[in-house]
């Protein structure tokens, strides 16, 4: 059961990884956030207590630029750029960098932020914006250093903490990412991006109960979002609570957002919980949802139902697979399904149908040892020993099936009191696959053979 549930978790992983980018959200959404834009535009001001000093001439220049900030950024940059000197205030470098940043000219903005912090190392707003650009550029080590410096200087806002979490996640440092996202969420509790980033960070640390609690809040706000239901289902599976995961997957289905993967996972859960009717329904829906899909997983679903004793449901699913996937099935899966169909027919008393199916398998692949053995066993049970021996001999010519074919052939000969011939076959089977039970059986047959001389 544990191994099966772990496999369910892995089968869902491929789906849940699609719901988030490296930090659990789309970075571009942050730049579109009106609150972020408002906060950024507010950064043109000066905090005289902790930031670089400006001369009266520089103050007058900045005052001239203010009317242009919302109307003509290109003109503002042209007026400002010639006034920046090695000994001018870092505020001028910072303001020019902001103008470029506001125009999404990040390559032009970056060196001016660097000049600003070089001139004034405690310029925390410049460190912050430097970090923002470096996150955008995928320079995560540099971004972490910039945000950390800002925070050492006493700064720190929700966006800086959130993007620091993004950078740590990209570096696979999920404990640090968790701490950063928790700080961001503390300052901006309604921000979905920070909460989703935190979910991703705690999931990576296998803190599944934390992830479930965080996702409860997201699902209360956004019950129509299938990705949140799927993430929580993953967490429930990891906590070995498959039926709660099934509730989430059913919710995705009710939203009309289920996928073959989520439906197959739902079927796996129901099969593991001995709910074969529900499992068969989910598997059938998964197959119908994508008739062009690869047939491997559909075949495995039918095999799983049969292995768990759900013979009727396995038979129903086999028919559905054959009807829906038809000629698109892979040849190997077609053979597996035909053999499974034969087993189901034999188990339900449909011997003639089973034989017809197995004969078809052998026609498709004359070297299918499994089908040859099933045919031989069928004919042996139905008092057709010559036909059974014919198939046993064909199966024994295949290295992989030789031992089993000779052993079963020997059993048929023992039933006919042909002990000496049976002993020869059993010796060879034991040479190929030594087993204590086979050795004891051989000894008994040899004793009977001696008694008949």
Image (tube, rainbow, N blue to C red):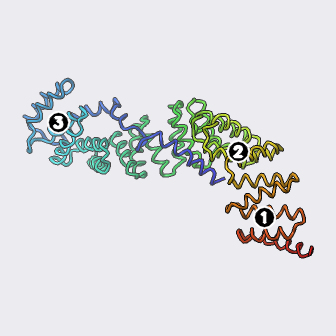
Residue most extreme to the right: 452
Residue 5: % across, % down: 62, 50
Quick one: SS at disc 3? helix
Q: Is 334 left or right of 96, judged from the image as shown?
A: right
Query: In the picture, residue 250 is in which quadrant?
Result: top right
Residue 126: % across, % down: 22, 42
Quick one: SS at disc 1? helix
Q: In terms of sequence position, does the residue under pointer 3 or pointer 1 come before the other?
A: 3
Quick one: SS at disc 2? helix
Residue 248: % across, % down: 59, 37
Query: CB atoms at circles 3 and 1 under 8 Å apart?
Result: no
Please name the residue shown 7% across and 34% down the image: 57
Q: Few, some or many C-alpha atoms within 10 Å of disc 3 (few <14, some 14-19, many ≥20)?
A: many
Image quadrant holding the C terminus, namely bottom right
Which residue is tagged 1? 407
The Cα–Cα distance between marks 3 and 1, rounded to whole angstroms, is 87 Å
In the rendering, which numbered label is found on residue 338?
2
Which residue is tagged 3? 96
**Residue 62 sits above or below residue 157 on the image:** above
Query: Can I make out residue 339 in this image?
Result: yes
Q: In terms of sequence position, does the residue under pointer 2 or pointer 1 come before the other?
A: 2
The Cα–Cα distance between marks 2 and 3, rounded to whole angstroms, is 72 Å
Could you say which is closer to the camera, residue 22 or residue 125?
22
Q: In terms of sequence position, does the residue under pointer 2 or pointer 3 come before the other?
A: 3
The Cα–Cα distance between marks 2 and 1, rounded to whole angstroms, is 25 Å
Query: In the picture, residue 420 is in which quadrant?
Result: bottom right
Could you say which is closer to the camera, residue 177 or residue 44?
177
Q: Few, some or many C-alpha atoms within 10 Å of disc 1 (few <14, some 14-19, many ≥20)?
A: many
Please name the residue shown 17% across and 36% down the image: 96
């Amino acid at each position: 059961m544990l191994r099966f549930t772990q496999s369910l978790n892995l089968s869902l992983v491929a789906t849940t990884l699609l719901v988030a980018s490296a930090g659990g959200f789309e970075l571009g959404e942050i730049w579109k956030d009106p609150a972020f834009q408002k906060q950024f535009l507010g950064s043109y001001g000066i905090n005289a207590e902790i930031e670089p000093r400006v001369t009266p001439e520089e103050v007058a220049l900045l005052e001239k630029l203010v009317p242009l900030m919302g109307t003509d950024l290109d003109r503002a940059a042209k007026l400002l750029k010639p006034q920046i000197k090695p000994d001018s205030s870092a505020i001028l470098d910072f303001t020019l960098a902001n103008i470029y940043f506001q125009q999404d000219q990040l390559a032009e903005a970056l060196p001016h932020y660097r000049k600003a912090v070089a001139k004034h190392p405690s310029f925390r707003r410049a460190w912050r914006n430097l970090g923002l650009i470096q996150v955008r550029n995928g320079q995560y080590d540099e971004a972490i250093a910039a945000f950390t410096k800002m925070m050492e200087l006493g700064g720190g806002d929700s966006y800086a903490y959130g993007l620091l979490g993004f950078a740590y996640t990209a570096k696979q440092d999920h404990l640090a990412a968790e701490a950063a996202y928790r700080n961001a969420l503390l300052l901006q509790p309604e921000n979905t991006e920070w909460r989703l980033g935190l979910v991703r960070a705690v999931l990576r640390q296998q803190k599944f109960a934390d992830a479930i609690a965080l996702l409860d809040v997201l699902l209360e706000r956004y019950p129509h979002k299938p990705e949140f239901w799927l993430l929580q289902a993953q967490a429930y599976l990891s906590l070995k609570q498959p039926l709660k995961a099934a509730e989430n997957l059913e919710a995705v289905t009710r939203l009309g957002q289920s996928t073959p993967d989520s439906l197959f996972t739902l079927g796996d859960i129901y099969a593991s919980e001995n709910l074969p009717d529900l499992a068969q329904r989910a598997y059938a829906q998964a197959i119908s949802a994508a008739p062009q899909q690869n047939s491997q997983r559909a075949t495995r679903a039918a095999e799983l139902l049969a292995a768990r004793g759900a013979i009727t449901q396995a038979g129903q699913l086999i028919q559905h697979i054959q009807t829906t996937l038809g000629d698109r099935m892979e040849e190997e899966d077609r053979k597996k399904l035909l053999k499974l169909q034969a087993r189901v027919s034999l188990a339900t008393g449909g011997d003639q149908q089973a034989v017809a199916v197995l004969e078809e398998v052998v026609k498709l692949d004359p070297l299918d040892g499994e089908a040859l053995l099933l045919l031989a066993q069928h004919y042996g049970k139905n008092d057709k020993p010559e036909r059974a021996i014919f198939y046993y001999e064909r199966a024994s010519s295949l290295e992989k099936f030789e031992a089993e074919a000779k052993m079963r052939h020997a059993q048929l000969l023992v039933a006919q009191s042909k002990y000496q011939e049976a002993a020869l076959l059993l010796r060879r089977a034991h040479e190929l696959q030594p087993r204590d039970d086979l050795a004891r059986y051989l000894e008994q047959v040899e004793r009977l053979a001696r008694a008949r001389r």
